[in-house]
């Protein structure tokens, strides 16, 4: 890193500033400003790259974003979108090498960010986003952690399992020890039990994790719906329940699904998600012979208590919906077709689940991975990381 030449006067003034005042000032600045100030002097650079300062800056940013309502999302066109547009010669396939940062309430684009590394497969996914740190993976089990705010990334080491088949992934922040974890499940055959391994950023290595629930667990592989992180646990939906993995205690548990049988009609499960920090379950009711749906959204208001499942929203949609995602803010993103043969491709609508107000043609063009996003200094002090 190039160093700026310091004048004797500037050096004396900086040396007269108490360390706590310097930290207080730096902690209130945006990420880009903090990164630039690393070049002022070696002392400031050493302060900025300490784990304690990175954590303090992150907590202040989180609080400021909540107070100001400045929440953001990041989305990346999925590999499945390539298949959807391949038959429409007039449309160019999406670039999975680009992520887009946008406002979470409107999806209005702020900026495009090019992914700085190459995958070994076009089948890529956004595993998750925690505190500005993104986890991306491909179908060849190559995984990267990437913080675009500090322009750093790292490739994760190879698995500790013998074979990887029918893989599912989850990405989480562990608050108890300020660490980041990637959880990977693998199942060699439909009849064999799942094997679990976990990567921790602090150790930069994988290790096996014992699954404490019964061995017939089948981890659903929905590549367009990252495993939601709620109440310190990652979640996967199975045929009969939700499986939760507490990233602090490293224990699995089952959570019951809400009772949807009371509606007298078969509801189609869509996905699970995080809704304002609560676990949400989305189901769809299709009306036979009609191109219309109703989306039912349940929220577990008291985490872990089955009786606290509460149906909060019913969202009607009078078109042929093909793709649905729920954002943490509470917006339902729907991809739909205007014609039954799909010649026109997908169109999109953003629906506020509380007011049912609909924004047509939001700034998204393909089925995409969608996650919350913020700027942070995470990975700035990391080992074995690459800069660009």
Image (cartoon, rainbow, N blue to C red):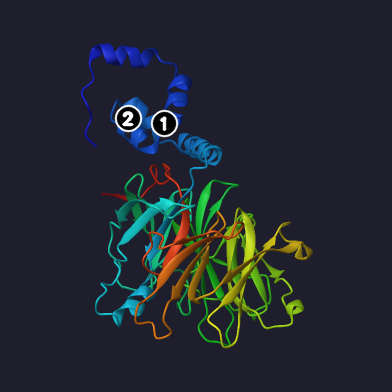
Dot 2 falls on a residue whose secondary structure is helix
Residue drawn at x 29%, y 16% as measured from the top left: 11
Tag shown at residue 144: none
**Taking 130 as reference, is 39 left or right?**
left
The residue to which callout 2 is attached is: 37
Vertical position of residue 329 compared to residue 342: above or below: above
**Taking 289 as reference, is 242 left or right?**
right
**Taking 253 as reference, is 84 left or right?**
left
Looking at the picture, how far across and down is residue 263, in whole percent?
73, 78
Quarter of the image for residue 348 reads bottom left
Residue 385 visible? The answer is no
The residue to which callout 1 is attached is: 29
Query: Could you tell me if the residues under marks 2 and 1 are in contact, i.e. CB atoms within 8 Å?
Result: yes
As rendered, which of 279 and 315 lies closer to the eye? 315
Looking at the picture, how far across and down is residue 137, in whole percent?
39, 66
Neighbor class of circle 1 (other Cα within 10 Å; few <14, some 14-19, many 20+) is some
Vertical position of residue 55 compared to residue 160: above or below: above
As rendered, which of 9 and 238 lies closer to the eye? 238
Neighbor class of circle 2 (other Cα within 10 Å; few <14, some 14-19, many 20+) is some
Quarter of the image for residue 375 reads top left
Residue 117 visible? The answer is yes
Residue drawn at x 60%, y 47% as measured from the top left: 176
Inter-mark Cα distance, 2 to 1: 10 Å
As rendered, which of 61 and 8 lies closer to the eye? 61
Work out which quarter of the rendered image holds the N terminus and state it. top left
As rendered, which of 269 and 305 lies closer to the eye? 269
Dot 1 falls on a residue whose secondary structure is loop
Looking at the picture, how far across and down is residue 206, in whole percent?
47, 62
Looking at the picture, how far across and down is residue 234, in whole percent?
58, 62
Residue drawn at x 57%, y 57% as measured from the top left: 330
Question: Which comes before the other along the chain, label 2 or label 1?
Answer: 1
């Amino acid at each position: 890193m190039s160093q700026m030449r310091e004048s004797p006067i500037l050096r004396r003034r900086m040396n007269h500033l108490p360390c706590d005042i310097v930290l207080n000032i730096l902690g209130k600045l945006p990420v880009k400003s903090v990164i630039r100030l690393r070049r002022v002097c070696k002392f400031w650079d050493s302060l900025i790259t300490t784990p304690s300062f990175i954590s303090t800056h992150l907590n202040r940013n989180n609080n400021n974003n909540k107070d100001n309502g400045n929440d953001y999302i990041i989305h990346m066109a999925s590999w499945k979108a390539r298949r959807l547009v391949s038959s429409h010669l007039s449309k160019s396939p999406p670039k999975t090498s680009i992520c887009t940062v946008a406002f979470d309430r409107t999806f209005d684009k702020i900026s495009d960010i090019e992914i700085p590394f190459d995958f070994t497969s076009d089948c890529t996914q956004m595993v998750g986003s925690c505190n500005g740190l993104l986890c991306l993976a491909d179908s060849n089990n190559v995984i990267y952690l990437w913080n675009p705010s500090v322009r750093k990334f790292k490739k994760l080491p190879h698995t500790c399992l013998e074979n990887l088949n029918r893989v599912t992934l989850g990405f989480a922040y562990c608050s108890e020890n300020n660490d980041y974890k990637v959880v990977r499940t693998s199942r060699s055959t439909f009849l064999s039990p799942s094997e679990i391994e976990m990567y921790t950023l602090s150790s930069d290595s994988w290790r096996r994790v014992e699954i404490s629930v019964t061995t017939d667990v089948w981890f659903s592989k929905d590549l367009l719906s990252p495993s939601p992180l709620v109440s310190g646990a990652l979640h996967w939906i199975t045929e009969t329940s939700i499986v939760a993995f507490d990233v602090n205690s490293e224990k699995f548990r089952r959570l019951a699904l809400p009772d949807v049988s009371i509606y007298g009609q078969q509801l189609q499960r869509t996905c699970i998600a995080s809704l304002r920090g609560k676990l949400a379950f989305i189901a769809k009711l299709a009306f036979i012979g009609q191109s219309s749906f109703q989306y039912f959204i349940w929220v577990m208001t008291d985490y872990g208590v089955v009786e606290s499942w509460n149906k909060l929203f019913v969202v009607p949609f009078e078109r042929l919906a093909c793709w649905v995602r729920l954002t943490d803010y509470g917006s339902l993103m729907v991809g739909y077709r205007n014609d039954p043969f799909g010649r026109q491709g997908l169109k999109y609508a953003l629906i506020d689940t509380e007011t049912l107000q609909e924004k047509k043609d939001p700034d998204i063009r393909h089925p995409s991975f969608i996650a919350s996003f913020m700027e942070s200094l995470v990975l700035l002090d990391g080992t074995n990381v690459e800069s660009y």
